[in-house]
Image (spheres, rainbow, N blue to C red):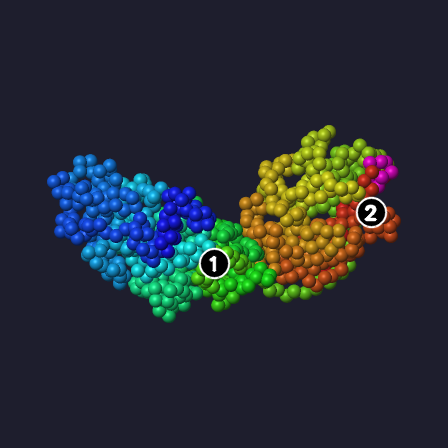
Amino acid sequence: MDDMITYGVASLTAPETVPEELRPTGPLSTDPQTYLIYLSAMSGKASESARKVLSPPAQASPATTNTAKINTVSTNAANINYDCARDEPYEYMTKDFYCWANVDGFVIFYNVVGGVPPTPAEPSGRPTVIQNMVDAVSIAAKTYRAMGYTITSNPAAPHGIFVGIDKILKWKVDVPFVMPIGYNFQPTIVIPSDSEEFDSEGYDYHARHELFHVFQYSYWPAGRVGVDLIWDFVVSDKFGSMNWWMEATAEWATHMTYVKYPAHVPDPTQKIRYAREIGAFLSKPMDALNAWGGWGKSRQYGAFLLPLYLTEQIGPDFVRRTWEHIRSAESAPIAAIKASLNGRDLNMLLHTFAIANYRLAPPQPLMEAMGYKDPDVDMWRSILADEDATDEDVLGGARPARARVEAFVGYNDVLGGPVQPGGSFYIDMAAEKGAAPATLTVKGFTTMPGQPVPGITWSVLVWSRAGEGSSALPEYPQAHNRWGHTQKEVKIEDFRYPMMATLIVTRHDLNVSSAAAMNDYRSAYWSATNYVPVQKRTCDLRKPSIGPLEFNAAPADAFNDYAHTTANGGTGGDSTYSMRMPDGRTLWLFSDTFLGPLNSNGTRPTSAKLVNNSFVIQDGTKLTTVHGGTAEEPKALLPPPDSTHWYWSGDGFIVGNTLQVAFHKYRREGTGPMPFAFDENVVATFSLGDLTKPTNITKMPSGAGVAWGSAILPASRSGDGYTYIYGVSDAPINKQMRVARVKGNDLRVGRWQYLTPWGWTEVEDHAADTLAGIANEYSVTPWKGQFLLLSQDSTEAFSGQINAFTSCDPFDGFTNKTSVYRMPEPGPLGSYLDPDIISYNPHVHYEQSTEGSLLISYNVNSMDNRVQPDADHYRDPGIYRPRFFRATIF
């Protein structure tokens, strides 16, 4: 052992004198401060001559020579020699000390000459910084002893505190630390003097913190410290597994000295230093409870929250009992914590600890057992507010770092993340302002395939944002807690603004080894759904019966006559939506529209203009076409934004003197008879006083690739105050319906909600397919206390079949499929005997129908897109014109 100490010191001061095979390698040589602590701890087994540099014997101990005098606080220059004897220096770590102060079994060595530590401007008695340290040591020693902590106390052999040691051998010292064996062969505090922290009052906090380490070494013998240190470097992490608890409890104990003796605080900034690393702890809450960042690193200091919380929950002796168990059972702190719980459930305590960290709030009526009682809570929160990793969020205050933040009203998602033993993660879910009340359901949990299931406790906290609570739901930080680990599911009804819900997950399968715990990441996942509940209606639902049909019904003749006589109006088009204007006229909406005139023989000239969308106003049998541009140079009402895009019309509705129309922007893509693809949705608003141009164009939801507005059921007809917007999940065949809704009658400003199997969501991508076999355009119409959906059958390509369905709701449940009519025109066997002819997009025209008679239109077109006199659209303009029939229904 003598050789180890001798060569160990030499390896730091003069490594060339040490035999190569005895020189330390790796961390032993790159971390000399830790290595010196190791040598100090192991020096207890060496001879006095071998250990004298690290653990010298007392030389004329001032504790026995000047006790009476040095216990007197000097206040004038004449008494300075009571503390200082410049002709009898004491040497420690190759440094001479000329002054000392004795207090409560500790002797503080320092110097005045040279300003280390700093002295008053005009020295008078003991320097202020030393007097502060004397007071701090006295307060801390009394506090720790009063709490039941013991150390050896021999007036003839006090513990040493050395102030102003900036180098040990040739190595710089920049932070205070405790040598396990030092002055008088006892734990010894070493404090440097060149840090900005050490101003005239800066030794107050450090004296209290390091003094608790001295007490801790009574429970963790020096020999074990040395063994654990060498194991930490070689094969294990025994020192780190102990040191995190040393630093956490030392910060806690320091805080207790300020709580017990609040009157003596020479500098308020020193009082709060114990909490300075709270952000380092809460910025990575998913890390292991006993994670150790390395000697002097931040996290273990911020972990003071754990002993503080457990002391509040279990009793004032909790921390001391852990150290007593460490000594008696030679255990690691995690085992000592488990043995010191007084029968309390550690799993639940760790989870409520996570909850307390998230709220950082004083006791509350709703959750008394899960909040901190400490008077410094507000101060902790102010420190957290400056921590980037725990930034403020929608809660209105700084929090532990969240794994994720969900800030929208509706979702069906998987939430989760990796967590180490004893760690926690947090996921915020917020109800948005203006959103409809929803039902939030959180279900858990699963792990990655093949991954062992960790011990998990989880719950969901429900609260309101700061300043926006109510008597029914108190504002943050008061909270309702819903336990999930026992229920497997947490359901929160009526989830609405300003409510918050936070998933808090704690892993409680601990590992006594810090290194092993820090390498044990496992991920756990929860499903979270947040949807506005579907309110189903009741009705006398029945299958419709279709009676006699009236073909070529009005206004078919009016459109045909107009096409043959107009000079510049519409001669053909598709879509064919309609609505009643306030003055009784009918407004028709068309997509692609050919404009006149026709040739005298009824054919269409190849020079005929084509616009992508237009309106036709019907007044009796008189028709007027509305388009953009001029008669000579007509343009679409919504002209193409460029040469590769254009707008086709969807459905619309009128409210007062305002018209809103859904338009679908398409782009050129591919080849063949239908070389286009959907791009995005917009809603155009028009004044009925001037339909030639929109007053506003607003983008509508388009992320799901759905052309919303295939049909629209206005709020005036829906019966629940919502406007329903219907779209289609497009496909070559078997297209499927999707449904959205907006409260009120303005598609631009209303919050869009989308139907899913779980309810209504505001996430467009979660909209679900519902009724299959519908067409790109269809109708939903109130009929006899229920709703009737009319659509072409898309279960087969270019089908001529028109079907009707009924439901009590305007959004789902359509059943009672009923055949209405088979369009005769399409296909080689159709009435044109032309394979290019197609028919599509049947609509019910509500305001021209009754409960017993429906006016229905559909479109006919040709895929012969040539611009030639013999092409279908030019040789027979009547092909591309809406058909109208009336169906008797009962």
Q: Residue at point 15% right, 47% down?
A: 73
Left/right placement of residue 555 relative to residue 456 reads right
Other-residue count near label 1 (Cα within 10 Å), few / some / many at <14 / 14–19 / ≥20 = many
Left/right placement of residue 131 relative to residue 369 reads left
Other-residue count near label 2 (Cα within 10 Å), few / some / many at <14 / 14–19 / ≥20 = many
* Position of residue 380 measured from the top left corner of the image (x, y, whole percent): 35, 50
* Magenta part of the chain: 867-873
Q: Secondary structure at mark 1?
A: helix
Could you give the CA–CA distance between mark 2 and mark 1, rounded to whole angstroms? 72 Å
Type of amino acid under label 1: Ala
Q: Which residue is mark 1?
A: 517
Q: Residue at point 47% right, 58% down?
A: 517
The question of residue 796 being in magenta is answered with: no
Left/right placement of residue 175 relative to residue 503 reads left
The secondary structure making up most of the magenta span is loop
Q: Which residue is mark 2?
A: 837
Q: Secondary structure at mark 2?
A: strand
Q: How many labels were placed on the picture? A: 2
In the image, residue 875 sits, relative to residue 282, either above or below, namely above
* Position of residue 297 measured from the top left corner of the image (x, y, whole percent): 40, 49
Q: Residue at point 53% right, 58% down?
A: 522
Specify whether residue 583 is in view.
no
Q: Nearer the viewer, residue 782 or 159?
A: 159
Q: Nearer the viewer, residue 256 or 207?
A: 207
* Position of residue 178 measured from the top left corner of the image (x, y, whole percent): 32, 51
